[in-house]
Image (cartoon, rainbow, N blue to C red):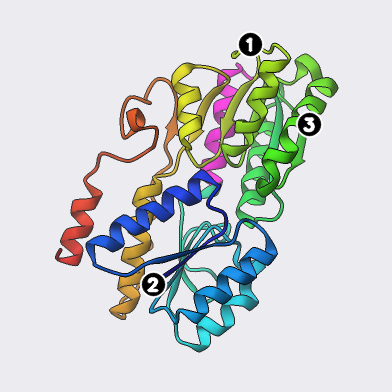
């Protein structure tokens, strides 16, 4: 089985890939990971390398199906069943695509909960900048949903939606953060992002300019990285992340692919949305710096697979 990862530097993608490998080990599948590095050239190379393996199944972790649709045609010709994680803007089968199941929480619900948390925490006075990456349909959908909630709050203010490529966060976010601080000053009270990685590179700049941890509140609509959990635990800058059950998603991807191997329909399961804050971070994997539901899902899947 082949995994095409869009960018293993992304904590969400890495967490899902690790979950896939854990679950595949139970079924004794041989798994090989191909990392695209977040670039078009990398996606071409990763898919070409995966194709030479002639895998029994293909799992796409992170790449937008719009961007790689032509690259998937040879796999279709080989009859390779495929599933994906965050490959489109909605969970479930991907229309007009060979991807039988997109595993994800509902991104619009994730986005709305994130934005509503900002409204609530600010008592309806949030001054918001939203960070997104227009290269991904799921990121655009999240950003638009967050903006809709903020605009519906009559006493809140949407300052800006800033498009910053996730793959270039380390390079771009320090300067972007300084620019936004200079432009909006005290008006900027809340930053919302489609992924925690934006804050990894914004926080050092906030510290440099002497911003206290409570001055700008950071909330992320995914994916629940270890660094985000550390910031929430320490109550420095980040107040919440709508974390995805990344390891569970890895197990679900293996289960969905296994169903296709057995000529069965996909499950269509969509996990519920979970906002991690300092109030609940002690549960469901929080001490391990991840959201890993204490619902016994590993045993459930083992029972399904008779393992």
Q: What residue is pinned by disc 1?
A: 212
Left or right: residue 234 versus residue 298 is: right
Q: Secondary structure at mark 2?
A: loop
Q: Nearer the viewer, mark 2 or mark 1?
A: 2
Q: Is residue 81 above or below residue 61?
A: below
Left or right: residue 129 versus residue 293 is: right
Q: Which residues are magenta?
A: 108-125
Residue 284 position, x and y percent, is 31, 34
Q: Which mark is residue 121?
A: none
Q: What residue is pinned by disc 3?
A: 175
Residue 125 in sight in this render: no
Q: Secondary structure at mark 3?
A: helix
Q: Secondary structure at mark 1?
A: loop
Q: What residue is pinned by disc 2?
A: 1
Q: Is residue 271 above or below residue 75?
A: above
Q: Are marks 1 and 3 in contact (CB under 8 Å)?
A: no
Residue 258 position, x and y percent, is 31, 71
Q: Earlier in the sequence, mark 1 or mark 3?
A: 3
Q: What residue sits 31% from the left and 29% below the top?
A: 283
Left or right: residue 16 versus residue 239 is: left
Judged by its main secondary structure, the magenta piece is: helix
């Amino acid at each position: 089985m082949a995994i095409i990862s869009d960018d293993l530097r992304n904590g969400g993608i890495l967490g899902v890939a690790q979950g896939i490998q854990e679950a595949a080990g139970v079924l004794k599948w041989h798994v090989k990971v191909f990392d695209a590095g977040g670039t078009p050239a990398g996606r071409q190379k990763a898919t070409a390398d995966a194709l030479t393996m002639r895998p029994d199944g293909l799992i796409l972790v992170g790449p937008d199906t719009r961007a790689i649709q032509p690259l998937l045609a040879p796999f279709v010709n080989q009859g390779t069943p495929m599933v994906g994680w965050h490959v489109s803007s909605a969970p479930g089968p991907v229309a007009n695509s060979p991807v039988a199941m997109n595993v994800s929480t509902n991104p619009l619900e994730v986005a709305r909960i994130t934005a509503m948390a900002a409204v609530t925490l600010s008592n309806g006075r949030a001054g918001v900048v939203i960070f997104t990456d227009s290269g991904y349909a799921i990121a655009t959908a999240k950003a638009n949903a967050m903006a809709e909630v903020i605009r519906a709050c009559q006493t809140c203010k949407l300052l800006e939606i800033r498009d910053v490529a996730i793959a270039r966060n380390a390079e771009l976010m320090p300067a972007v953060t300084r620019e936004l601080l200079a432009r909006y000053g005290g008006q900027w009270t809340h930053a919302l992002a489609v992924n925690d990685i934006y804050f990894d590179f914004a926080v050092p700049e906030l510290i440099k300019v002497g911003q206290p941890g409570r001055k700008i509140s950071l909330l992320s609509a995914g994916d629940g990285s270890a660094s985000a959990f550390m910031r929430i635990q320490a109550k420095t800058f980040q107040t919440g992340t709508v974390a995805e059950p990344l390891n569970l998603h890895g197990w679900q991807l293996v289960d969905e692919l296994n169903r296709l191997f057995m000529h069965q329909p996909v499950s269509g399961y969509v996990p519920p949305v979970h906002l991690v804050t300092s109030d609940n971070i002690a549960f469901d994997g929080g001490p391990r710096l991840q959201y890993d539901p204490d619902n016994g899902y590993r045993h459930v899947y083992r029972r399904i697979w008779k393992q």
